[in-house]
């Protein structure tokens, strides 16, 4: 899903370091989602939690760095960067899929596409689907091509509110990171309480896709990004800052080397345990039958994801971090946002009835099409607008944004909906 500027961060307020392991984490997350939606990994939906934790971490790190450098956060600049990063790929997908559905889709699919589209545009699709009782655990049904965008809406709502909260905290005075950590932890606890209170064992869709009950997945990552939590992580697992400090106090090089290996191994072992635990969960859990997920299980999984992100940043040379930096995973992670955008519409349109494909044959076709379209989107649309288009910044960017929003609004009105089916009840009987 989302990618935050560049994917790596370094400790402190200095220049950020690109960490390949974080790209790999995105690759793992999107793989889980792909396998889940094609019916090959029952717990793969938990990849969304990993996306959330990573996004919360990176966004908060960016905000805290800006505060450390300037004493404040430019909300306009922040939101402008988010728009340039996320909107182009989303708009292309919305337009192409809507027109394609109108050309080849059945009437019910066309109706829900035109109904859901405006809510995607305003980043409220998760609440719209909840209002229409569109259950997540029936795989959104075959009549919704934008149902998967609930998670994008949750992230966008987070990007709208969280920087404002961080800015308010920054104006309290010193020790900004500590206060940000406290706010993130407290709001996470409230979010968990809401999930446990509102959970319905028969259909947990409300608590799974509601922004209020999923906020902890993002905020736990945000908490790990703060200096007090990162320092605590270093003290607990002996990651690089502590290891280096201890090594400098030892007089001989052989002893220093042994100490570095021993202390560094603690972080690697901790990361390995987290990966094993998350892997078991992805392989065994089922969204409907695993009611414990909604009484604390998702919170623990999100916490594990946040810890894994923090360990990869603190100790990038561990076995886990190096494995996550594997080139295929990294490359998949770099296009994970667009892969997420495209994969579900493709899965709906490439139905067994339309293609004659099923099982792994259909899954591989979906994977190939999603990765292919995501790659084209990145190189032809996303990167040019994000990095090279001067017109997409400043006043020109605002004009372009307004024009795109107006164009999407026209699309939803201009595309004709199929005629409603009427039944003459006078002929029944």
Image (cartoon, helix red, strand yellow):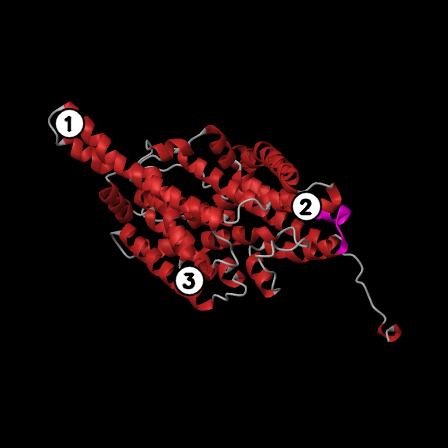
Tell me how far mark 1 sits from mark 3, CA to CA. Answer: 47 Å
Q: Are marks 1 and 3 in contact (CB under 8 Å)?
A: no
Residue bounds of the magenta highlight: 95-107
Q: Which residue is mark 2?
A: 97
Q: Which residue lies at the image location 37% right of the left edge and 48% below the top edge? A: 304
Mark 2 or mark 1: whose residue is earlier in sequence: 2
Note whether residue 264 is visible. yes
Please tell me the numbered disc located at residue 295: 3
Q: Which residue is mark 1?
A: 255
Mark 1 or mark 3: whose residue is earlier in sequence: 1
Q: Of circles 3 and 2, which is in front?
A: 3
User: In this view, which residue lies farthest toward the top?
Assistant: 253
Q: Are marks 3 and 2 in contact (CB under 8 Å)?
A: no
User: Please, what secondary structure does the residue beneath circle 3 have?
Assistant: helix
Tell me how far mark 3 sits from mark 2, CA to CA. Answer: 37 Å
Q: Which residue lies at the image location 50% right of the left edge and 60% below the top edge? A: 210
Note whether residue 66 is visible. no
Residue 38 position by quadrant: top right
Does residue 361 belong to the magenta stretch? Answer: no
């Amino acid at each position: 899903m989302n990618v935050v500027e560049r994917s790596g961060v370094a400790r402190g307020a200095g220049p950020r370091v690109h960490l390949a392991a974080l790209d790999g984490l995105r690759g793992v997350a999107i793989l889980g989602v792909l396998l889940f939606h094609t019916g090959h990994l029952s717990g793969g939906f938990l990849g969304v939690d990993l996306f959330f934790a990573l996004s919360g971490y990176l966004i908060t790190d960016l905000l805290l760095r800006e505060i450390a450098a300037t004493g404040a956060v430019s909300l306009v600049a922040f939101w402008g960067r988010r728009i340039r990063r996320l909107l182009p790929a989303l708009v292309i997908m919305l337009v192409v899929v809507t027109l394609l559905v109108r050309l080849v889709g059945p009437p019910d699919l066309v109706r829900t596409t035109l109904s859901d589209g405006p809510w995607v545009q305003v980043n409220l699709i998760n609440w719209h689907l909840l209002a229409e009782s569109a259950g997540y655990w029936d795989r959104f049904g075959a009549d919704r091509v934008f149902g998967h965008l609930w998670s994008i809406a949750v992230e966008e709502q987070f990007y709208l509110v969280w920087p404002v909260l961080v800015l308010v905290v920054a104006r309290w005075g010193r020790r900004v990171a500590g206060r940000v950590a406290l706010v993130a932890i407290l709001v996470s606890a409230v979010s968990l309480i809401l999930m446990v209170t509102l959970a319905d064992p028969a259909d947990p869709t409300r608590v799974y896709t509601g922004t209020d009950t999923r906020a902890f997945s993002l905020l736990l990552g945000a908490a790990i990004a703060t200096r007090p939590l990162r320092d605590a992580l270093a003290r607990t697992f002996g990651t690089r800052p502590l290891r280096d400090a201890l090594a400098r106090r030892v007089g001989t090089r052989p002893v220093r080397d042994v100490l570095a290996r021993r202390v560094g191994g603690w972080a690697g072992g901790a990361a390995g345990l987290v990966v094993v635990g998350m892997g078991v969960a992805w392989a065994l859990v089922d969204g409907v039958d695993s009611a414990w997920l909604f009484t604390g299980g998702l919170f623990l999984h999100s916490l594990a994801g946040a810890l894994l992100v923090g360990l990869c940043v603190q100790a990038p040379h561990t076995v886990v971090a190096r494995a996550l930096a594997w080139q295929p995973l990294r490359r998949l992670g770099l296009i994970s946002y667009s892969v997420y955008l495209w994969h579900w519409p493709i899965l709906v349109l490439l139905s067994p009835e339309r293609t004659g494909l099923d099982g792994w044959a259909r899954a591989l076709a979906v994977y190939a099409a999603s990765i292919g379209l995501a790659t084209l989107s990145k190189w032809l649309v996303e990167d040019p607008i994000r990095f090279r288009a001067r017109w997409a910044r400043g006043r020109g960017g605002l004009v372009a944004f307004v024009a795109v929003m107006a164009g999407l609004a026209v699309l939803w009105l201009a595309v004709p909906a199929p005629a409603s089916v009427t039944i003459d009840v006078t002929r029944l009987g």
